């Protein structure tokens, strides 16, 4: 851990993007129990964003965490998402709305959300870095950062242009490690060259590295003793400079499993690393759609198409399962979903595939 962030107790964080839900509402009793156990086990880092769970994430965090614990018991990260403001004048009111939703007076980390080349250009034109620096000077932000979804070359350009960025959140997992689109390894290496601590998102790739094809499951079963999530999260946490690995946990059981192997973190042993490489090859040969279920696409889709559910159905069918009935949809081919997709998926083409395969 970087000593600059010594208030962080352990390098494992609770992402508030995939909380347990009941009839469209956050399961507050279960999330409260998850928060209590997370803190009791010595962890203290929480991550949210204004759009997570259609605006319910920040409010759940206030109800389950910030209204129940003193401010020095937790580290809180929130994000500035570009589709919630159009002008520079709207940034501070949005920020204040986020503080109120979370029930806090400041954020420990505040990230420019889902930066790509085009989004960063827009943020810079609107003066976002200057606005965030002013908020930091006022004590409302402790550290400025960004979450990132683009090429390593673009990341290098941004970090060179904006030295105010203190931390970088990247997608990093064993499946995307050498992926030509996600470029996990290359982006990580850029962060290291710039001396920026790394926050890891999607270490289990939206759960796809937990729910494995049968051939991949057999590889890990032969190792014995650890969960699929353990191999994925420990892979990401084992690299130097990883300040925080986030997990969007959806049940108390998932949380208990995750903290059990992150309380006294041990990197993957050589035999485990070999198994991970074998599983990676098996998954790639399945031809699955690389959707993580982040739902950024559904936030901007004018038709409200349940894109993650459709892609999950395709993957289920390709894995030999029986997907649920697909919902009817009419795609306008506007491309808004592709502009925001962290996985750089050709969503419009894949929706045609989904329609063909799921009927």
Image (spheres, rainbow, N blue to C red):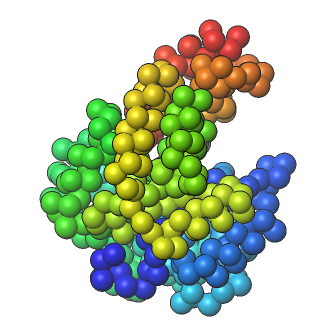
Residue 63 drawn above or below residue 279: below
Q: Quadrant of residue 182?
A: top left
Question: Is 104 placed left or right of 88 in the picture?
Answer: right
Give how far across and how far down residue 311 sits, in percent.
Answer: 60, 27
Task: Write the residue at 20% across / 54% down.
Answer: 190
Q: How many marks?
A: 0
Give how far across and how far down residue 91 sits, in percent.
Answer: 45, 64
Give how far across and how far down residue 199 sits, in percent.
Answer: 38, 62
Task: Write the residue at 70% across / 69% down.
Answer: 34
Residue 350 shows up from this direction: yes
Give how far across and how far down residue 5 sits, in percent.
Answer: 35, 81
Residue 34 drawn above or below residue 87: below
Q: Quick one: 17 or 210, which is closer to the camera?
A: 210
Q: Quadrant of residue 58?
A: bottom right
Task: Write the residue at 78% across / 21% down.
Answer: 325
Q: Quadrant of the N terminus?
A: bottom left
Question: Is 286 placed left or right of 304 in the picture?
Answer: left
Residue 14 shows up from this direction: no
Task: Write the residue at 38% across / 61% down.
Answer: 267
Q: Quick one: 329 or 257, which is closer to the camera?
A: 257
Q: Quick one: 32 or 235, which is closer to the camera?
A: 235
Q: Quick one: 92 or 59, which is closer to the camera?
A: 59
Q: Quadrant of the C terminus?
A: top right
Residue 173 drawn above or below residue 304: below
């Amino acid at each position: 851990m970087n000593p600059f962030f010594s208030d962080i107790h352990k390098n494992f964080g609770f992402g508030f993007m995939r909380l347990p839900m009941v009839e469209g509402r956050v399961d507050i009793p279960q999330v409260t129990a998850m928060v209590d156990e997370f803190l009791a086990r010595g962890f203290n880092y929480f991550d949210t964003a204004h759009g997570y769970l259609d605006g319910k994430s920040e409010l759940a965090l206030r109800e389950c965490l910030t209204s129940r614990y003193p401010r020095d018991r937790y580290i809180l990260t929130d994000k500035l998402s570009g589709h919630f403001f159009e002008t520079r004048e709207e940034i501070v009111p949005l920020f204040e709305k986020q503080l109120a939703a979370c029930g806090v007076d400041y954020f420990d980390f505040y990230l420019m959300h889902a930066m790509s080349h085009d989004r960063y250009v827009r943020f810079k034109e609107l003066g976002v870095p200057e606005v965030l620096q002013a908020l930091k000077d006022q004590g409302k932000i402790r550290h400025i950062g960004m979450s990132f979804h683009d090429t390593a070359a673009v990341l290098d350009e941004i970090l060179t242009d904006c030295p105010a960025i203190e931390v970088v959140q990247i997608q990093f997992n064993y499946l995307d490690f050498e992926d030509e689109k996600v470029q996990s390894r290359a982006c990580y290496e850029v962060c290291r060259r710039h001396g920026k601590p790394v926050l890891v998102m999607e270490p289990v790739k939206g759960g796809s590295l937990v729910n494995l094809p049968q051939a991949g499951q057999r590889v890990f079963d032969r190792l014995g003793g650890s969960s699929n999530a353990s191999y994925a999260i420990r892979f990401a946490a084992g690299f130097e400079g990883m300040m925080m690995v986030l997990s969007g946990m959806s049940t108390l059981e998932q949380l208990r499993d995750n903290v059990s192997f992150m309380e006294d973190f041990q990197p993957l042993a050589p035999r485990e690393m070999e198994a991970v490489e074998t599983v990676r090859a098996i998954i790639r040969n399945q031809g699955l759609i690389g959707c993580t279920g982040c739902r950024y696409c559904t936030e901007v889709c004018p038709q409200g198409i349940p894109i993650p559910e459709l892609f999950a159905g395709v993957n289920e069918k390709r894995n030999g399962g029986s997907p649920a009935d697909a919902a009817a949809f009419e795609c306008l081919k506007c491309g808004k979903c592709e502009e925001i997709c962290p996985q750089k998926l050709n969503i419009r083409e894949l929706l045609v595939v989904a329609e063909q395969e799921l009927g």
